[in-house]
Image (cartoon, grey):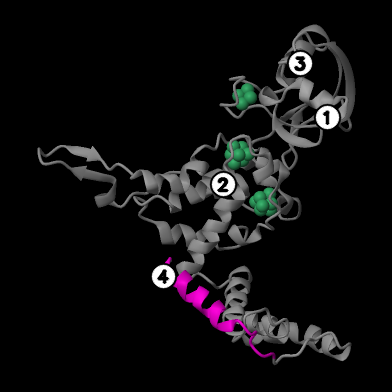
Amino acid sequence: MRATFAIQKFNPEIDARPHLEEYRLDVAWRGNTVLDALFQIKHQLDGSLTFRASCRSAICGSCPMVINGRERLACQTLIADEIDRSGRIEVKPLRQLRVVKDLVVEMDPFWSKVNAITPWLTPKREAAFVRHARGEIGEVMIPQNVHQTFYNVDACILCGACVSACNSLDVSPGFLGPAALAKAYRFVADPREGERRERLERLTREDGIWDCVRCNFCVEVCPKDVQPMEAIIRLRREAIREGLTDHPGATHITAFMDIVRREGRLNEARMPLAMVWPNLFRMLKILPLGLKMFVKGKVPSFFQRPIKGIREIRRLFRLRETFK
Ligand code: SF4
Ligand code: SF4
Ligand code: FES
């Protein structure tokens, strides 16, 4: 099979900006991966081509790249599949991170964010170890059903593909990002963790869990089914349960739920007020927009009757309380 590869090249010592370079290659076997092709190009056509790789088995997380517009592990992406889908193969480095050379990006900002969430257990003394009858110290085993709550996030290989795909990072470079937050959930969910609330407090500050715009891109590109967005949603749920609701993202959820519980549907007129109440400063801030909308006839009725099936809705809310 003859395939065309367009690979982004950039050597900061000689190039003003990155450019695509084309290579045509005979790929011997349909099972060959994009990483196999990169090695072939390096050995046969262009010794200067620079990329990272190690395990070749989707384990080490070294080889994420943007292949045909999407973040993938090069060692896990079959050339034949890409050719069938797009007719050619375009390979670029990860987004959001500075390009060092060709397909190699600087991972330091990624590691700093992972480091910022304290990526290790800070155990409660009594929960981390047990003293057996004979006196020796032993580990505490986590029951299977508890382990299942964080098994997905445990599978992360820290490749950074999700960070490259993250929409929120495009506009908020300080955002902790999907990989770090998924890891944070791994420790918040651990029954041995001794600083669960402190962790949640930190994560609800600026650049934390409320900065995610829930685009799902991190879930789509993750090669290990970590589902970072799901972990972020669980962190939000835990933060609200802990009463950490002093953030517009949290008040949006609590106000929304409260209105639906009372009226059975959303009340668009009450929602903004419910979100800022009783903070006078925030109320004054939204007042001009509210008045403008009122003058233009865009404010729906403040008073609406609860829907017919409101009893059923309230019963569902009560049921939900019992499952908390
Ligand atoms: S969450 Fe998935 S995509 Fe993100 S770093 Fe971990 S393995 Fe890679
Ligand atoms: S869902 Fe959130 S964390 Fe995931 S890519 Fe979108 S904005 Fe980023
Ligand atoms: S080379 Fe290790 S994940 Fe691809």
Q: Position of residue 117 (x, y in %)?
A: 51, 50
Looking at the image, residue 18 sits to the left or right of residue 188; the answer is right
| Foreground: disc 2 or disc 1 | 1
Nearer the N terminus, badge 1 or badge 4? 1
Q: Amino acid at mark 2?
A: Ala
Residue at 80 percent of width and 86 percent of height? 299
| Foreground: disc 3 or disc 2 | 3
Q: Amino acid at mark 3?
A: Ala
Q: Position of residue 275 (x, y in %)?
A: 63, 79
Mark 3 to mark 2 CA distance (whole Å): 31 Å
Span highlighted in magenta in the image: 304-323
Q: Which residue is mark 2?
A: 180
Mark 1 to mark 4 CA distance (whole Å): 49 Å
Q: Which residue is mark 4?
A: 322
Nearer the N terminus, badge 3 or badge 4? 3
Is residue 8 among the parts visible in the rendering?
no
Q: Which residue is mark 1?
A: 85
